[in-house]
Amino acid sequence: MSEQNGEHVLARRIAGLRTNAFAALVMLLIQLVLGMWVNLFATIPSADGGTGFLSAFFRAISNGPVGLSVHAILGALPLVSATAAVVRAVVLHRGVLIGIASLALLAIAIAFVTGDRYVATSNASASWVMALCTAVPLFCYALILFTVASVRDALAA
């Protein structure tokens, strides 16, 4: 592979990870705002109480209210994005980026599971853990954006 071709591949991979991190930041901010709305203004349907894992998730989607349904549906997107970020970091062969992206994925997975628990129990501590587990990947993706060189800088180095 020529040096120029290798630089092009590296540039595409860096751009992909940075785009992924930015998209995840936006998704998580939307989720954070929707989650605050649900916590403050939505009434969790009583039919959702005491249900098992993922059962509460599907009931939240079908029983509403609409803010909770949207929050639940969009909650799966950060999981997909976080998984893609880990794969992109692995492809770049950068241990620090793999660690940061993996921490973000773990926090998002915990937030997802805790959200399911919140719908099932309406426990305020579950809502608090969800918020904390949203803050962690927000920081992780901001860190990726600030520490990964832009494509232009990477090619100039």
Image (tube, rainbow, N blue to C red):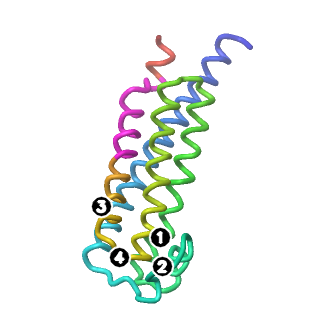
Q: Mark 2 and mark 1 in contact (Cβ < 8 Å)? A: yes
Q: Report the disc number at residue 60.
A: 2
Which residue is the site of mark 4? 122
- Front residue of this view, candidates 36 and 103: 103
Between marks 3 and 2 in the image, the one whose residue lies nearer the viewer:
3
User: Which residue: 48% across, 79% down?
Assistant: 60
> How far is disc 1 from disc 2 in space, using C-alphas?
7 Å
Find residue 117 and report its horizontal and vertical position in percent: 44, 69
The three-letter amino acid code for the residue at tag 1 is Ala
Residue 125: quarter of image? bottom left
**Does 99 sit left or right of 4 as displayed?**
left
The three-letter amino acid code for the residue at tag 3 is Trp
User: Which residue: 52% across, 24% down?
Assistant: 95
Between marks 3 and 1 in the image, the one whose residue lies nearer the viewer:
3
Between marks 1 and 4 in the image, the one whose residue lies nearer the viewer:
4
Which residue is the site of mark 3? 128
Find residue 5 and report its horizontal and vertical position in percent: 68, 18
> How far is disc 3 from disc 1 in space, using C-alphas?
16 Å
Circle 4 — which element? loop
